[in-house]
Amino acid sequence: MKKIIIVFIGILLLCGCSSKSYENGEINVLNWSSYIPYEIISNFEKEYSIKVNYGTYSSNEELLAKIASSKNGTYDLIFPSDYMVELMISRDMLEKMDKSQIDNFSNINPMFLNQKFDPNNDYSIPFLAATSVIAVNRDRVKDEINSYNDLLNSKYKNNIVLLDDQRIVIGMALQANGFDMNSTDSKKLEIAKKWLLKLYGNVKAFDSDSPKTFLMTNEVDIGVIWNAEATLAHEDNKNIEIIYPSDGFALSLDNYVLVKGAKNKENAYKFINYLLRHDINREITNYYPYLNTTISNMNVDMNDLFNIFLNSSYVENIGSDISKYDKIWAEIK
Amino acid sequence: MKNNKIFKTIFTLPILVYTFILIVLPLLYILFLSFCTSDSYGGIIYEFTFSNYIKIFDLTYLKILFKSALIGVITTIICILISYPFALILRRKSAHIQNLVTKLIMIPFLTNSLIRTYGWIILLRKNGIINNGLIMGGLTSSPLNLMYNRFGIVVGMVYTLLPFMLLPICSSVFEINNDLIEAAKDLGAKPLQIFRKIIIPETISGVFNGSLMVFIPAIGYFFITDILGGGKIMIIGNLIKNQFLTARNWPFGSAISIFLIIITFLLVKLYKRLGGKMDDLGGF
């Protein structure tokens, strides 16, 4: 018994010794789950000798709750989406960005700068963008599909996967009827609800975690999902076609922002600069094929990007009208 | 004797502190929140109101309540139908086998229920093991819809919650005094009469105990409706989760939670009135 204890303590000691020390301190990062490959983070730690304490979240609301309930200075760098940046600015939760500290800022594609949620990019720097798209398995669906209204065809019973996100799905129903996807008009929402009730019979599942799996396993043939998921499904099966719906679609832009009271600003700037570096940045979108926001690594051509900006809308803060959406969501399901 | 008292205090104190900080305080906070309102950004406005409770009785939410209850009742009934015969058969086996089987029931519980639920996807999906087996056996020509509907949800619920029914029913069935049954036989009772007059009255509290333990989680386990129901059917658990995560309406979410607690209390009251003991409820 004694021997076992001695060996055990020895192992513990060895483990203790092998842990690296970081000369240049640390940063506390909260990011979306599966957004930056692990190797990139550990390479940064080695290169700059900065420890990255990396946590994840899976929705903007979860991020908001985490930041609001933690002590000032707990987190340095976070990655909220457009509307959440706006909300956090209005609640004075963010630190202004000193862009002169970030050399690679010049690499950002100007198309993604000066968006209305942060007009001068005082607080935020674009990280990655996503659009909702229609993905269709062309092995099994031959009909022409351009619009959300094409999905109402009763042929597709139990054959569609949608994002489990009330703003995106109800927004899509609004767009299908020619309305703005952020509309809070009760009459328009009522029309959208009726449209969704019609579509419901064709929906196999609502899933935000991994809707691509539904397409890749032939569980469904059509999905309205994020572009990165659709691209991964396409890489798995070349006959999965990605379609930008003619009625419009959702655009979501995630950003680097510093939390108010961040203790490791310098290190956070270094980390942002590192992630914006040409080669590193390319690796991120090779791994997770969202829209790259830099000039040197664009993964769609300029024309397509123009079209995307022309036809898409951001999810906007709609204040207490969110309860209307929530009620429709409860009525549909 | 005095020593004993000190010991008792020392040993119960951590549990009392634990219960107070981690259970009583959060519940009081939820009760408090349920009478507040939320602003447009999800912040909480400290103004006293009953509106959250009134909102629960909106037709939309009543429908969700009803749907949840339906899933809960179906799950409970299926669990009883599986557990009761199982316990009666196991009763005749030796204590050794009873022990072994009870442990086997507990073993899956050592794995995370979320992972076990994901496991069902492999079995139930369109080109999953069950559908492929049925097609190969010529029993069906096109794959059946075994999940992403109410059926899938009930399968997941029954699987996850079955032990909560099995264990109380088993313990009450094992406790039936054999002499009673022998005596009834000697007096000429038929098996059905024995079942109705002895076994059911002796085990009804176990059944009700199990039903409480199954029904209440079944209306709240949102991860099962999300995974095996494909997020298509909303139960109370999903509704509460949405209030906290997407609708940013914590007060309304709290009010639904308190409403759920009240329902639980009423069911426990009913359980006591039917002669159930509180000790059995927490003590298997």
Image: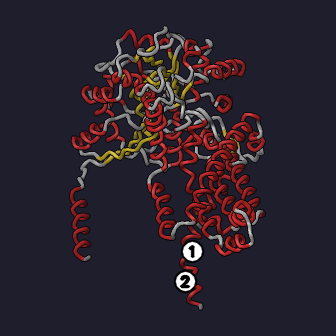
Give how far across and how far down residue A289 sits, in percent. 36, 25
Label 2 amino acid? Answer: Phe
In what quadrant of the picture does the C terminus of chain B appear?
bottom right
Q: Mark 2 lies on which chain?
A: B
* Dot 1 crowding, Cα within 10 Å, few <14, some 14–19, many 20+: few
Residue B69 visible within the image: yes
Q: In which quarter of the image is residue A108?
A: top left
The mark found on residue B7 in the picture is 2
Nearest the viewer among B186 and A13 is: B186
- Is B239 located above or below residue B98 in the figure? above
The residue located at (69%, 59%) in the rendering is: B208
Q: Is mark 1 on a helix, strand or loop?
A: helix
Query: Which mark is first along the chain, 2 or 1?
Result: 2
Which three-letter amino acid code belongs to the residue tagged 1?
Answer: Leu
Q: Nearer the viewer, residue A124 or A83?
A: A83
Residue pictured at 72% horizontal, 37% vertical: B61
Residue found at x 75% / y 44%: B53
- 10 Å neighbourhood of mark 2: few (<14), some, or many (≥20)? few
Q: Nearer the viewer, residue B222 or B162?
A: B162
Q: Is residue A115 visible?
A: no
Residue B177, label in figure: none
* Chain ID of residue with mark 1: B
Query: Which disc is residue B13 wearing?
Result: 1
User: Of all residues shown, which one is farthest toward the bottom?
Assistant: B1
Residue B56 placed where, x, y %? 74, 41
State the scheme by which the image is colored.
Answer: secondary structure
Q: Position of residue A198 (x, y in %)?
A: 64, 19
Q: How far apart are marks 1 and 2 (CA)?
A: 10 Å
